[in-house]
Amino acid sequence: MKYSVITFGCRVNQADSLGFEEALVAKGASSAPPEQADFVIVNTCSVTASADQGARQTIRRIARLNPSARIVVTGCYATRRPDEISALSNVVAVVPNDDKPRLIPLMSRNSLGAEPAPPLRLPTTADRFGDGDGGCGAPIEPGVAGRTAFTLRVQTGCAEPCSYCIIPATRGEPRSVPIEDILREVDRVVAAGFKEIALTGVHLGSYGRDLKPAHTLIDLLRALQTSSSPDRLFRISSLEPMDCTAAIVDLVAGSEHLAPHFHLPLQHASNRVLAAMRRPYTIEQYASLVDDIRARIPHAAIGSDVIVGFPGETDGDFETLERYLASSPITHVHVFPYSDRPGTVAAAMRDKVHGTVVRERSRRVREISARLSNSFRAAQIGSVHRALTLEDGSLAVTGNYQKVRIPPGLSRNQWVQVLVLSPDVGELVSE
């Protein structure tokens, strides 16, 4: 069987898709382009209207280019609007997030297109890590499907009441993987050759609160650091500002196992808008956090997300956002033009911002992001970083997430020391 997996959205979806590929390869399937595959899995996002549209367009394009393809759709859009997706050509199954563990067994039994599957229990650790019905066996080797780092989901679900977000409805309540199971999975993927592991979750900062006994993210990070060899690097994915504690910053600052890379969604710099978004912090608290990170770890990358055009956002609110970003230590910004998500509090709010205004404000924030990124990369010139080789070995990514070209001659997935010569060029140096 030839398969293709197309992934939209967050690192959690990326982790789930990697699990699908592990299971398919273990069962003897081979990867192929979507236009040549027997089965195509489309793992969707639904964070914005454009994400929904992108998934629909992709499904239609696959059906047009590969009329015999059997398309399986999962992810947040599939969970939120299954009827919309099932009406599209070639879609033979729509699998909500909670049923993802049965996706590969379903394909293996060739039961696609039969009666709709009944609801299943929530995913367990065994499902995620390949010890259950759809056992994965050994993980995909580094380099397969273009991957060098392994994305490891340690938590899913969210209970935060952000007024614009549909994800709690599509991902459910927070559920965490026990620390001992995570340590075993880390050993498994490291044995397969992975040197960098990205830790991800829908609300990563809530890790462990649902476990008995309860744990915290810092407990997990300390356990990973204690059990790790120098060959392993862990990268923390998106972390809500209120969850990025001083203890986490201190641990990253003093660790050779944790990448100096934070992604801390701001969403806005106007306290009035933050309150309307139901974000549980102020701009003063956020600014204090990122300023402290910059002081403690001068070379750290600090990414962020912002929403532009939230209902009721005034010119003054947007100018506050512009001023803060332009003077902040943030190194790159992902810009999300606001769009209504039916079922959220924000969708019912008045004073919607006109689309042309939203697009112009988005453009201005992207310009600021480009300046911040260029400034950070320029500041790294002359510094030396440990980096992991990618692609054909002539590209390397540093712990603080700079990608630099290096002289050819190495294979991918090797640790090297790189002297940054320019924003995108480096040279190899000895330890």
Image (tube, helix red, strand yellow):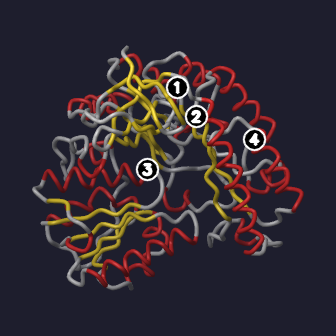
Which residue matches tag 1?
A: 218
What residue lies at 36% left-to-right and 16% top-to-bottom?
Answer: 430
N-terminal label among 4 and 1: 1
N-terminal label among 2 and 3: 3
Residue in front for this viewpoint, 195 or 208? 195
For discs 2 and 3, the disc positioned in front in the rendered view: 2
Which residue matches tag 3?
A: 12
177 relative to 254, above or below: below
* Label 1 element class: helix
Q: Residues within 10 Å of mark 3 (few under 14, many from 20)?
A: many
What residue lies at 83% left-to-right and 72% top-to-bottom?
Answer: 351
Q: Residue 307: percent from the left, percent from the top? A: 69, 57
For the residues labelled 2 and 4, the Cα–Cα distance comes to 21 Å
N-terminal label among 2 and 4: 4
Please, which residue is most extreme toward the right here? 316
For discs 1 and 3, the disc positioned in front in the rendered view: 3
Please, which residue is most extreme toward the left here? 28
Q: Residue 27: percent from the left, percent from the top? A: 12, 55
89 relative to 151, above or below: below
Checking the image for residue 301, the label placed there is 2
